[in-house]
Image (tube, coloured by chain):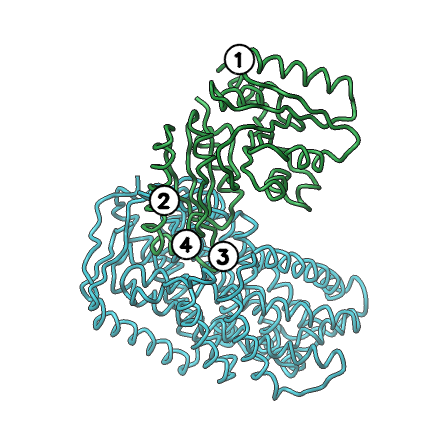
Amino acid sequence: MDSGPSSVGGTNIEGESPQVEPTVETDDATITDDAELERTLGLTGGLAIGIGTMIGAGIFVFPGLAAGRAGPAAAASFGIGAVVALLVALPTAELATAMPKSGGGYYFISRGLGALAGAVVGLSLWFGLVFATAFYLVGFGYYAVDTLAEVGIAVGDGLVIPLALLFGAGFTVLNVTGTENAAKLQNGIVVLLLSILVFFLGYGGLDAVGLIGDSAAPERFAPFGTMPVLTTAALVFTSYLGFAQIATVAGEMKDPGRNLPLSIVGSVLVVGLLYVVTIFVATSAFGADQLSEFGETAMVDVGRHYLGPIGAFAIVFGGLLATMSSANASVLSTSRAIYAVSRDALLPRRASRINLRYGTPHVALGLAGGPILVLVATGRVELLAEVASFLHLIMYGLICVALLALRRDEPAWYDPDFRVPGYPAVPAIGAVASFALIGFMQPVSQLTGIAIMVAAAGWYAYYARDVTLKGAL
Amino acid sequence: MTRVLVPLAILEGESVSAGLTTLLAPLDVTVLGYHVLPEQTPPDQARLQYEERATDALVDLTAEFEAAGGRADHRLVFTHDREQTIDRVAAETGADAYAITGVTGPIDRLLVSLTGDVAVDRLCSFAAELVGDREIGVTLFLATDDESGGRESLEAAARSLSERGIDVETELAGDQPALEALVEAAIGHDAIVMGERAPSLRSLVFGEEAEQVAAESVGPVLVVRRVEERDDTVERRD
């Protein structure tokens, strides 16, 4: 069914060509000529990947940083992020149901817009995920130090980076050698986190609106004006980088026509709501200035403010789990992104080799883990977050453009189960909003992002300029 | 026609012993080669690397079944979840039973356990079709607390099999846990036929009963699948 006309072909400089075979997609499996690929992830699995990736950053790392920049209006920054994410999530969901394959955004763009755009996005996505993972790991380092402080071992912030490096290396090794099914653990962690948060935010929310406890002194909503609200939105957009990761496992999702849109859109709605409420509760507990002084782990003090030592402990524990689950989910997405690119001959085929002993893609995991550790060592939280957002936003914008291109002249194979409501306005605004958000970033982040994209384009020109992918399913 | 699914971890060198190939000759066989991947690995990535090797092995195995006089085909699945794959392929091929391969030589005597959730009729007709007109004896086994009722249903089942010219014995176990009694009764038999059990707390904790029996008895175990209520009528028609 999915074997429409395609212009796939060409070889890279090593003589490898894209591995594309006609397949039949059913709700339970992908059927190729000689083999079947079982779909084993359900709706909960998809939601756990999306929420598990996103929730670590927005709630446990950003509140202090964002409040320092935008004041209580940081809640609006998160709101803007949620709207942009939703505008991209809807087109992503449509494309994912039309092309339920490994690779996610890279796959849609290479098939919709061609190999050059695909290569730039695919390789940038690799680095985007690497930056995001490094950011989560640094966040994890802060929580690890705070956890030690809570149990009475004060080590100071000097250990943040060493701890982050240690765990980053640990995750990579575990992912190469571990064959136990960690998916169930991830689901459990997400459920536990959501319970902690809902309880804490429910209590804090009631307090903040003055129903219980003392009413806090009102503060000006946007003390620094509108511009910081927008630049903060660009910074905290890193908190929304998980929904497209669901599309990287689209090939393994059961009943993709139903579960992909539900988990992609659902996870954005869930975390968006939680973020806005979190910032509201946090800025109600302390003034924005004080919150900013607490830095990366400001939420621990918010927890202490509302629920005493138990609250502080719950948040520290939640922060550890959340940053860990974000980092782990991103490492897995990175290796899938590398695989998708290497299958299409844009990277050497060696990159997707599977380890004979463990059955894991050790080369791809190494290509994820190595650069992650280098970036963690820099320890620059805001730069890591913004470059990650930059590279993802480029992809998000192009996903919307790919949708518009495919819809304008629908190929025979294009048959999504889910169609974007409000076409063409939603993808058009999604594309504009994604690119516009980039404009509010710090120049150094923008330059780093552009340099990575130029390098990716250069690699394509050198390594694989004869490869064509447009329209090849 | 009765079909048996033979799931094998094909890339881990699992194979079928000659005794089982011969035993299954009168039936249709689908060899299900599967490869379980950790969640870090997309199934498609494993397919690119292993498909050829796995297909070669499956073609050879299928040929062995055909050389023994049976009809066989094969499927190859890359998966994260073995049980889900076996259930799906069993349902798609309409398999009546699946095999846990085990090790055995030529098969002279089968143990057919009537204990459990699968109807006695269904187990008996499966056993009868499996034996056909070959010189293979059958021992019917039932573990129950209700001794007279158990004796009666064993006798009735034995009658229906001996009418088809099969050498039948019966064995009733009472005061012992059913699983241990079955494993004990399996001594002196070359293969076991038993019914699939409905999932229970016990199977969640200790694993499926058939797997435990297979591990204890070493020889092959043929597990006759439960049929859903809805399919029951279809089942009886043929």
Shown in cyan, the chain is A
Residue corresponding to mark 1: B164
Badge 2: chain ID: A
Residue A117 screen position, x and y as percent: 28, 64
Q: Residues within 10 Å of mark 4 (few under 14, many from 20)?
A: many
Q: Where, by quadrant of the figure, is residue A318 drawn?
A: bottom right
Amino acid marked by disc 2: Ala
- What residue do we see at 38% from left, 42% from top? A25
Inter-mark Cα distance, 3 to 4: 26 Å
Amino acid marked by disc 1: Arg
Residue corresponding to mark 3: B38
- What residue do we see at 78% from left, 26% from top? B145
Same chain for marks 2 and 4?
yes
Residue corresponding to mark 2: A35
Q: Nearer the viewer, mark 2 or mark 1?
A: 1
Amino acid marked by disc 4: Thr
Badge 3: chain ID: B
* Most foreground residue, B162 or B52: B162
Inter-mark Cα distance, 3 to 1: 48 Å
Inter-mark Cα distance, 3 to 2: 18 Å
Amino acid marked by disc 3: Pro
Inter-mark Cα distance, 2 to 1: 40 Å
Q: SS class of the residue under badge 1?
A: loop
